[in-house]
Image (cartoon, rainbow, N blue to C red):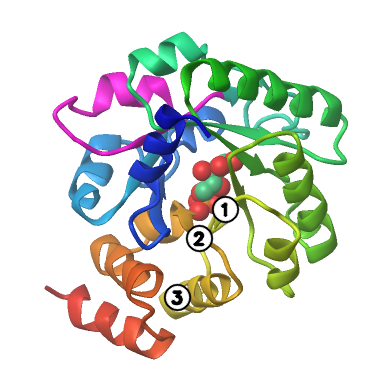
Amino acid sequence: MDWGMKNRMSRIFKEDGKTVMLAVDHGYFLGPVSRLEDPAKTIEPLIPYVDSLMLTRGLLRNCLDAKYNIPIVLRASGGNSVLKEDLSDEAITVSMQDAARLNVSAVALSIYVGSEHEHQTLTNLTKLIDAGQDYGIPVLAVTAVGKELEKRDCRYLSLSCRIAAELGAQIVKTYYCEDFEKVVKSCFVPIVIAGGPKLKSEEDVLEMTYNAIACGAKGVDMGRNVWQSNWPIAMITAIRSIVHEQASVKKAFSLFESLKNK
Ligand code: 5RP
């Protein structure tokens, strides 16, 4: 890996090799999703607690002050909306020149393995990786499933993550699943987990985080389970304690409880 790319990776992954990323890119196909209607209001209070932000260039340019020294992972795929049944028909939506102009630490693109547009999303990934190599900008591949959430099992996610790594993605974002250690073991680049739709309780989110890290994930790239919580700062702090301080679920949950009414 070249110096520029290594340097960008080290901005995202801290000295312990782990990262707490906040995903707020949902509007690229969901529009004004609940609690992100006014993005700055939701995002700004969380910035001191996260290692990077994953978002779109529209949100970045319009809603986030350039004074923040927070590594940016720029959403660089899209081209459809939640109104379509099949979400896999994505294109590359940002040039690498613009990503460089925005001084981002990585770009992110979704792949839809097994979908109608599998080939298109995988070749989008390789094109973005080639462009990223020219600029020293790493690519994070998201193993997306669209509306088919039931696809998220070990066999499917191992296949998707491994393909992303084989095609050259420097980081893979996927879902937690049963036997997750097999997914991690078969993927030779760092894996971070998405949170997915909001879980029943904060404790469930902490348990998922703990299990993912115990199985070898290098961190989280979560959205809704943080900022749709009524206590987003308590939530991200508790998640952070698991990722960076090896806290147990019990310890992280009691931290959450102690912070939530402050
Ligand atoms: C959409 C994404 C989202 O950023 C991702 O799903 C993370 O957010 P959440 O934790 O809310 O699922 O990549 O494809």
Choose the circle earlier in sequence order: 3 or 1: 1
User: Which residue is under mark 2?
Assistant: 218
Please state which amino acid type lies under the numbered disc 1. Answer: Pro
Region rendered in magenta = 56-76
Task: Determine crowd level at label 1: few under 14, some 14-19, many 20+ residues with C-alpha closer than 10 A.
Answer: many
7 sits to left or right of 156 = left
Q: Please tell me which residue is depicted at 20% across the width and 43% down the height of the picture.
A: 44
Q: Secondary structure at mark 2?
A: loop
User: Which residue is under mark 3?
Assistant: 206
Q: Nearer the viewer, mark 3 or mark 1?
A: 1
Q: Nearer the viewer, mark 2 or mark 3?
A: 2
Q: Please tell me which residue is depicted at 46% across the width and 54% down the height of the picture.
A: 222
Rendered location of residue 181, percent (x, y): 69, 71
Please state which amino acid type lies under the numbered disc 3. Answer: Leu
Check the image and report above or below for 231 versus 222: below
Question: Ligand 1 within 8 A of label 2's CB?
Answer: no
